[in-house]
Image: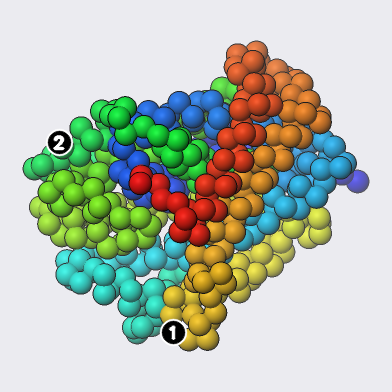
Amino acid sequence: MKRERSSFTGRIGFVLAAAGSAVGLGNIWRFPYLAAKCGGGIFLLVYIILAVTFGFALMLAEVALGRRTRLSCIGAYGALHKRFSPLGWLASIVPTIIVPYYCVIGGWVTKYFFEFAVGHGRQVAADADGYFDGFITAGGQFLDNPMPWFLVFLLVTALCVLGGVDKGIEKVSTFMMPVLVVLSIIVAAFSLTRPGALAGVKYYLLPDFSRFSAMTVLAAMGQLFYSMSIAMGIMITYGSYMKKEDDLERSIGQIELFDTAIAFIAGLMIIPAVFAFSGGDESALGKGPGLMFVTLPRVFADMELGGLIGTLFFLLVLFAALTSAISLLETVVSIVDDKAHWGRRRSTIVVTVFVFALGSLSCYGYGGGIIGSIQPLGMAFLDFFDFLSNSVIMPVVAFLTCILIGWVAGTKTISDEVELSGPFRRKQMFEWMIRWVAPICLVAVLVSSILENLGLLRYGS
């Protein structure tokens, strides 16, 4: 007997949950540092154009595929065309790899929120480099070790997924996403009032076309994967929970708007503040964890009310990390439940134990012990898992998805699904992107991402 599939209570619930998945660490720290490295305003302009074309087409394809098949990614591709069944397994690897190390980083955020909330922000900032390095290498006492914070973040995420689609994921997203917007606006407004912040605003908002290059486009396209949860199986899973009568195209447009708006506001939070703190030095917007865990605590320590603003900022990042982690864990749980038929509770427990085991490698991968001594491709485990999932598998999955929908099953399979709930206003653009533009762009993203991670290419250079 076919089991009834869980569903969101309505379109708003789906939009907020899917937006919660899309809005995460990629929006809060990766988008601002890429904008700074790749020309500021010109990067922002290119990103927005790509979000409403390239990003829209890929996200719509995945959500419509999920709603059409009512399956998670591991079964959805095969349901559309049997020869593409292995693509479902490949796509399922992405969230399985990402969620363990994402929860480790979520634990880092939880630790920093706690330190700022109890008034230790200035102590953290006083030796920001040493504090962060000591923490991630597990060089301190129990609470200065990443493991307990990783566990707290993982357990909170698992409890939300245990609650189910409507009572867990949807309720959490309905609360967290509006709060996230309000916190973003508060921190951005405070950041913009800092002396010297105007130079950062101009750099961020005014396009300088002399700084435009192919790398600007490639960096923006790569960011879309981080920012919009594309090629992770998440949108297929969430689409499978979406009701047939809900306007699919309109929902995707609202998710895009929400996601891009948060990324935009994150830039206003971070770029002007760091510009003001550094005297206009773009290099202060360093890549990766250093921006959030080293540079920004120093910026907050230099501000009036910096302790409060730092607390609000890390609460904002914590909410963003949680909503994304919930979607990642839910995707893996859905895959396991679809195949093993264990039910949500047992599937969630088994997946959580697996995430803890694999996440432990990333948790201790920067330390000096046995785990830290193992360096796949010369990388710590967290960096290796990030490279494998984001730079290799995701572009491959997205490329093969375009081939399946654009050339094998046909774009009509998606168009018909969209038109069940209303007119498909961007139909021609969608078909052109999926068949022609996106596959070419995805090959370029794959090549450039691999070259960048191997140190043979640098964005912004």
Secondary structure under tag 1 reads loop
Which of the marked residues, 1 or 2, is nearer the chain's N terminus?
2
Residue 246 seen in the current view: no
Secondary structure under tag 2 reads helix
Residue 257 seen in the current view: yes
Judge the density around disc 2: few (<14), some (14-19), many (≥20) Cα neighbours within 10 Å.
some
Instruction: Identify the residue at image location x=50%, y=64%.
Output: 383
Location of mark 1 (residue): 368
Residue 198 marker: 2
In x, y percent, where is residue 263? Answer: 38, 39
Q: Is residue 389 above or below residue 192?
A: below
In x, y percent, where is residue 307? Answer: 18, 58
Locate residue 229 relative to residue 344 in the image: left or right. left
Q: Is residue 379 above or below residue 263?
A: below
Instruction: Identify the residue at image location x=20%, y=72%.
Output: 127
Query: Quarter of the image holding residue 354?
Result: bottom right
Q: Is residue 184 above or below residue 303?
A: above
In x, y percent, where is residue 25? Answer: 43, 51
Instruction: Identify the residue at image location x=50%, y=43%.
Output: 222
Amino acid carrying mark 1 in the image: Gly
In x, y percent, where is residue 394? Answer: 62, 48
| Outermost residue toward the right in this view | 1
Locate residue 66 relative to residue 446 in the image: left or right. right
Query: Which residue is at the front of the view, 283 or 306?
Result: 283
Instruction: Identify the residue at image location x=55%, y=30%.
Output: 54
Amino acid carrying mark 2 in the image: Leu
Judge the density around disc 1: few (<14), some (14-19), many (≥20) Cα neighbours within 10 Å.
few
Locate residue 72 relative to residue 215 in the image: left or right. right
Residue 324 marker: none
